[in-house]
Amino acid sequence: MLWLLCGPCGAMDSQALVIRIKIPDGAAVDWTVHSAPQLLFRDVLDVIGQVLPDATTTAFEYEDEDGDRITVRSDEEMKAMLSYYFSTVMEQQVNGQLIEPLQIYPRACKPPGKRNIHGLKVNTRAGAGSAPEALPSNSLKKSSAELKKILANGQMNEQDIRYRDILGHGNGGTVYKAYHVRSGKILAVKVIPLDITLELQKQIMSELEILYKCDSSYIIGFYGAFFVENRISLCTEFMDGGSLDVYRKIPEHVLGRIAVAVVKGLTYLWSLKILHRDVKPSNMLVNTRGQVKLCDFGVSTQLVNSIAKTYVGTNAYMAPERISGEQYGIHSDVWSLGISFMEIQKNQGSLMPLQLLQCIVDEESPVLPAGEFSEPFVHFITQCMKKQPKERPAPEDLMGHPFVVQYNDGNAEVVSMWVCRMLEERRAQGAQ
Ligand code: ATP
Ligand code: MG
C-alpha cells in the first residue's frame, strides 16, 4: 500500500496518492499517482477514459463525510477535493487507522459498456501511475448512515471519547478536539462545569433535543450531550478551519460568501423560532471544504441560565437594546451579525473595551470607513447596526440585500481555498 504524509491543505511531504476509481457496477480500480501535486483534472479524466473507454466522462465525484457526492469539474475543484482528502488522511493517521484511498466516482454522459467492467487494466502516462488492481467495492470506511446512527442514538458517552487537543476556552467552558472510538470520528467536545440539580440536568437534556432536528449545512452538526458529575459535554462536528475570530481582514469576495452562509444559518434558526443570542466571530466556524457553520446558539434556556449564573454574560457584540435590558428579538441577532463582520474587517485584533459598550447604547453606531470597503458591504453593516431594532433588515431583507445577493452563488471553493491558504500560512509561521 501507499502512503503519503501530508498537511491538510495538500502540503505533501511525500508525493504519492492512491485514487480508487469506482465503476458503476460496483468494481473499482486503484491508481497510484506518484506525483500528486502535479496532478491535473485532465489527467484524472484521461485515466477514467482508459478504465471506461465507452463512456464519455466529463466530471467525477467524491463523497464527503456525510456521504454527499461533490462534483469535480476543474483543477480548482480538484484542489479542494485533495485538501479535503488530505485532512481525512491526517485524521486517520492521528487515530492510527488504516489510511484509505481517495475514492472517486466517474460521471459519464453515456453509460459504459458492460465489457469494460471485467479484467480491468489501465495504462497511465509514463511516470504518473502504476498498474491498478480490481477491487471489491465494499469500503473500510464506516458508512455515513451507520455513523449517523451511532452518533445520533443518544449513545454518546465519556467512555467512547478520547480527548486530544484543546481548541479553545470560552466563558463557560473548554472545547476539545476529540476522537470518538466507536465511529472513528473526530469531534469537537465542549465541556462546561455546571453545579446543578438532577432535575435541571434533565431539563437541559430535553431542551437540547431540538438540536438533533436541526438539519442545515449552515449549522454545526450535533451528535449528542451527556452529563458526567458536575459537567456537561456537548459533542459536535469538528471544523478544521476553526472560528472566524482568529482571521482578520478577510478579502471581500471571501467574506461575502461567508456572510451569505451566516445569513442562511440565522434564517434557518429563525425559521425554527430559535434566536441565536450569541452571534459573534468565535461562533462562526469554517472548514477546508469551504463550509461555514454557526454554533453555540441558545436552544436551552436552562443551559444559558445556568452558565450565566457562573459567568458574567456581557459581550461587545450585544445589541444596544439588550445591553439596556430590553426585549431580545431577531433584530438583536441582526445587530450582532453586523458588528461581528465589522469587527472581523477591522485592523486591530481586539474587541472594544467593555466600558465602550455604554457608548453603543448612548451614542451613534460605529461605521466602517468608506473607501476601504465596498459600498454594498458598508451599507449592509450600517443597516444591521441601526440603533432602532425595527430599522434593521428583517430576515427576507437580509437575503435580498445587494451584498448578500452578489455573493449568493454557492461557490464554496472560494472559501475552501482561502481557509487552506490561511492554515498553510499559520503552519509555516508556527514552523519558523
Ligand atoms: P464564549 O464562551 O463567550 O461563547 P467562545 O465562543 O470563544 O466564547 P467556546 O464556545 O468555548 O468559546 O469555544 C472556544 C473555541 O473553540 C472557539 O473560539 C473555537 O475556535 C473553538 N471551537 C469551538 N467549537 C468548535 C468546532 N466545532 N470545531 C472547531 N473549533 C471549535
Ligand atoms: Mg463559542
Image (tube, grey):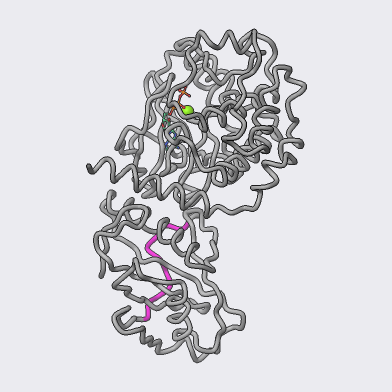
Q: Residue at (28%, 53%) from the top-left corner?
A: 93
User: As displayed, is residue 387 above or below residue 369?
Assistant: above
Residue 208 shows in the view: no
For residue 321, side relative to residue 171 (left or right):
right
Q: Residue at (46%, 72%) from the top-left corner?
A: 41
x and y, in percent, of residue 114 in the image: 53, 89
> Does the stretch in magenta take in 138?
yes
Q: Which residues lie in the magenta part?
A: 134-143
x and y, in percent, of residue 88 in the image: 37, 54
Q: Nearer the viewer, residue 162 or 29?
A: 29
User: As displayed, is residue 125 above or below residue 147?
Assistant: below
Q: Nearer the viewer, residue 392 or 219?
A: 392
The C terminus sits in image quarter: top left
x and y, in percent, of residue 326 in the image: 68, 10
Q: Residue at (66%, 14%) from the top-left corner?
A: 364
x and y, in percent, of residue 234 in the image: 45, 31
> Does the stretch in magenta take in 308?
no
For residue 345, side relative to residue 392 (left or right):
left
Q: What secondary structure is the stretch in magenta mostly built from?
A: loop
